[in-house]
Amino acid sequence: MSAAVAIGLASGYLGLLLVKAGLAQHRLRRAPATAASERMAQVTVLQPILAGDPGLGAILAEQVVALPEARFLWLIDDDDAEAQRLTAALAAPTGGRVHVQSFAPAPAGCNPKAFKLARAMPVVATEYVLVLDDDARLPAASLATLLAALDHHELATALPHYRVGASWPARWLAQFVNDNAALTYLAPLAFVSPVTINGMAYTMRTERLRCLGGFHAIERQLTDDLAIADLVRAAGGRIAQTAAPVAMQTDLPHWSRYVAQMHRWMLFATLLLRRQSLATNLLITVLGGVHPLLLWGGVGLAAARPGAVTALPLLVLLVVRWWVLRRLLQLQAPTCSSRPLVSILVELVQPLHLLHAACRRTIRWRTRRYRVFDNDRFVPA
């Protein structure tokens, strides 16, 4: 009986993984090797910036060099003295290609990122806008892919991966994203169009964004990526989830920062699920929620009934899992490395993060704490 259950758990896990990986790999392999676009000069890069990460200056400087024709608007806070010093020093030698705008802190109940983006939009004079996180590195080829996708879509977004950080919490965060990004964003495209985006790197035509109400329309929404996706879809627009890579790098010096980041992401995921149909929720659950439970089942059975009949199926599961995820990551980001043991542990704790988000609906957003009821309903805690 134990052998049959162990084989069933391993078979279910690997069968689902191979289907998802096959769908994601198909998208990764057919991604065009886009050369630099002549439209690069018609792009304004909007980057909301918050100081604190030790690598911020290097990332910003590298991004300006990576997109030599684009214009940059760096959006900082009036009370962020470090960001003011850093951006002023980096913008000075760019010949006017980089402009810095400073804003008063966003009022309570207002998304600080969308707040700054909304107030920066009036000075944008280019045909396209690229919204880019301050810890992102987007190569020119990826931007060209996003711009090409706008020929047939209203919004195009990139596929994130994380460069491994120096601390263990940063490595765990990187492993979570690198294991799941392609499976989460690319595999479902075989069945449904994107229901949300990752807000780390996305492009739109400036005039189209303004016609939809711009960022003013979403500044009272907690998760700006879900809000902008809802705005586009509500107007009948199409979203392109491309395989164009964007490299992220975040410093997490303490485990509390890792837990807080995972809590926010999982809470935001619950807000997404509330907006979907039953069929879409079932698809998301099967593609994203079943794997950790099957893995827990295999590990738990092997621990409760030690022996070859339970250990061997689990070993096969772990070896195949490592090979498949490593292969996907090589296609997505060849320079990224993977830690097999960390990868297993990160997947095992995913249900705990989700349970944490379901039970605790309070998050810290910058200097404020909010009790979250929905994407457009959150109150100071």
Image: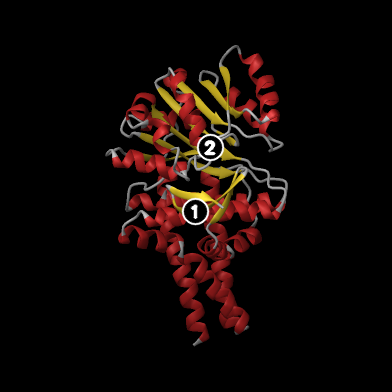
Q: Which mark is residue 107?
A: 2
Position in image of residue 94 (x %, y %): 62, 15
Position in image of residue 183 (x %, y %): 46, 53
Position in image of residue 316 (x %, y %): 55, 70
Q: Which is in the foreground here, disc 1 or disc 2?
A: 2
| Location of mark 1 (residue) | 372
Position above or below: 302 against 116: below
Near mark 2 (Cα within 10 A), the count class, few <14, some 14-19 or many ≥20, is few
Q: Which mark is residue 1?
A: none
**Residue extending furthest toward the top:** 95
CA separation, marks 1 and 2?
17 Å
Color style of the picture: secondary structure
- Badge 1 amino acid: Val
**Residue at disc 1, secondary structure:** strand
- Badge 2 amino acid: Pro
In the rendered structure, the answer to whether residue 178 lies left or right of residue 28 reads: right
In the rendered structure, the answer to whether residue 84 lies left or right of residue 131 reads: right
**Residue at disc 2, secondary structure:** loop
Position above or below: 64 against 370: above
Question: In the figure, residue 283 lies in which quadrant?
Answer: bottom left
Q: Is residue 255 visible?
A: yes
Near mark 1 (Cα within 10 A), the count class, few <14, some 14-19 or many ≥20, is many
Q: Is residue 21 visible?
A: no
Q: Nearer the viewer, residue 288 or 232?
A: 232
Q: Nearer the viewer, residue 98 or 227?
A: 227
Position in image of residue 222 (x %, y %): 48, 45
Residue displayed at 66% across by 15% down? 92
Label located before the other in sequence (1 or 2): 2
